[in-house]
Amino acid sequence: MFRRILALLLVLVMVALFTASCGQSSKPQSAEPLVWGMHTDIETLNPIFTESANEANILNAIFSTLIKVNDELEFEPYLLEEMPVVSQDGLTYQFKLREGIKFHDGVELTAEDVKFTYEMKMAEKNAVPSRLRWERIANFEIIDKYTFYITLKEPDITWLEGWAYAESMIVPKHILEAEFIQGGNELSKGGNFSRKPIGSGPYRFVEWKANEFVMLEAFTDYFRGKPQIEKIVFKVVPDLNTMLARFSIGEIDIYDRAAPDHYRQLLKLQEDGMPIEVHNFPSFMSMNAIFNMRLPVFQDRAVRQALNYAFPKERFIDVVLDGVATVAHADTPPMSWAYNPNLKEYEHNPEKAVQLLREAGWKLGEDGVFAKNGVRLSFTINTNTGNPVREAFQEIAKQEWEAIGAEVFIQNYEAATLFGDILRNLKFDMIVLGSAAGIDPDSKTLWHSSQRPELYGTGQNFAGFSNQRIDELLEAGLKETSQEARVAIYHEVQQILSQEVPYLFICFFNSITAVPANLENFRPNPTLAGNAWNIFEWKLN
């Protein structure tokens, strides 16, 4: 089965490559746009609602954050004159904005816009992905046009990091407030601003054609100077094999977060003379299959553990991902200072999977499917169409799990539907997704019981996981300032997750990105900031 899937993937790639020439020449600095390929369309260009990596890359160009986290995992001021001053008790942060920063319509960005961004995150009717960071604020005080204080309800060592990411990009109060009021004190992903944004970043919005592209142009009055690349187009190419083929003939200039099984093909293009650079580096990106634990079939831990034992993670990585990943046992990547190397591991052991099911009271029916108390071991796996790695996971999982007595269906959707209706409304049994973690190991939004969206209207605890000890640990991890003590906390968090397996933790990816060899100042960033974090510094020579 593995050889057949791998062969199929390679055939698709080779067919694409044989129909293309790899003689692309580096683009000179000209009016020709730099084309960034992305394999799914986006839902919104409003930072208030963003939660996707593709959106983050585009928003890095249109909007600005107070701080940046660079490729060395260091914080640096961006909209701020300097990093904020923190009070001795760790509760109050003093921020000072740079003067003269303009939005794309010429209006100056001030402390009022920062406070308005916070208010939009907290507005009751706004369906934001998570309010966790914003709910920690006790008081927001504007001192003058450029100075403001933020006081937290309690110390939180992780809180500042979020200001470096897309969810905290500053929106213009003078534009968005009117839309908010007209909407009955509510904004939406489909609102006018979400489709035609105005930010303060290096590029102005030009056009968004759904499922095709987003076009941006350099902003002349950008506070760090007009970008040298005049136009950037983020082009949607849903099928990754097609993405590789188009990259090989120069229709796509940047192939970001390339499929792991394309790594060798990209290196071959480089070896054959294509003027590109291929970056391969550890990342905070992972791939997981989320169990919907609200369903009776997945409420039994024995089922979740059995499915873990029945899936061959190592062989999946070797054959489908060409070895460009590491096995995951919990939610924290090996590159993290908080990584626990001593977790429960689920080696491929179908016999043990069956034993677990039988011991938990599951009985094999005449139809070859296990059942218990009227509940059959039957479920559907969802993911987004056009992603060969996730689709390969589904096919392998279906075969392996049906071999131990499960009934498995596959149903895939276009990305907008999957991440919108299916994920947000929890209309899945099991869903296969990629995930990006921050520098800090805090994962409260994923695992804390208060982050179950069906109960509280916000949060990303899509699994519906509730564990009192996890709640206590996650809350303690936010207050503790000693890294040694925090290591112990997050080691225990990972230990519990590896036992309870609310996800089938599959792997941590290396991040692979191919760019033109003459693209200067491209510095890959493994954090949630994304590889477009310093897009304002790029130039083509």
Image (tube, rainbow, N blue to C red):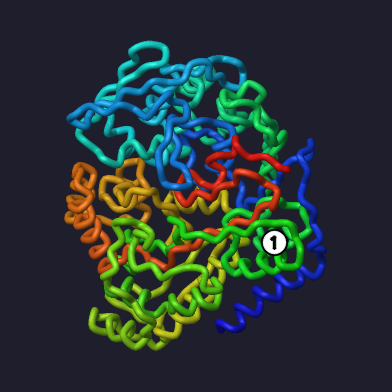
Secondary structure beneath dot 1 equals: helix
Task: Report if residue 372 is visible in the image.
Answer: yes
Q: Can you say whether 517 is above or below 498 in the image?
A: above
Q: Is residue 211 visible?
A: no
- The C terminus sits in image quarter: top right
The amino acid type, in three-letter code, at marker 1 is Leu
Image location of residue 357, percent across then percent down: 29, 81
Q: In which quarter of the image is residue 206?
A: top right
Q: In this view, does 511 lie above or below 7?
A: above
Check the image and report above or below for 277 versus 342: above
Q: Viewer-proximal residue, 111 or 393?
A: 111
Q: Extreme top residue here?
A: 144
Q: Which residue is drawn at 59% across and 63% down?
A: 259
Image coordinates of residue 397 in percent, x first then y, are 47, 75
Q: Residue at x 56, y 67 (%)?
A: 389
The crowding category of the residue bearing disc 1, from other C-alpha atoms within 10 Å (few below 14, some 14 to 19, many at least 20), is many
Which of these two is toward me, 104 or 209?
A: 104
Q: In this view, does 30 lie above or below 171?
A: below
Report how many numbered discs are placed on residues in the image.
1
Left or right: where 242 falls relative to 286: right
Task: Quarter of the image for the N terminus: give it.
Answer: bottom right
Rendered location of residue 23, percent (x, y)? 81, 60
- Judged left or right of residue 293, residue 288 is right
User: Is 54 placed left or right of 244 in the picture?
Assistant: left
Q: Which residue is tagged 1?
A: 244
208 or 75: nearer the viewer = 75
Q: Residue at x 23, y 55 (%)?
A: 487
User: Residue at the spot x=36%, y=23% of the render?
Assistant: 95
**Picture coordinates of residue 153 (x, y %)?**
21, 30
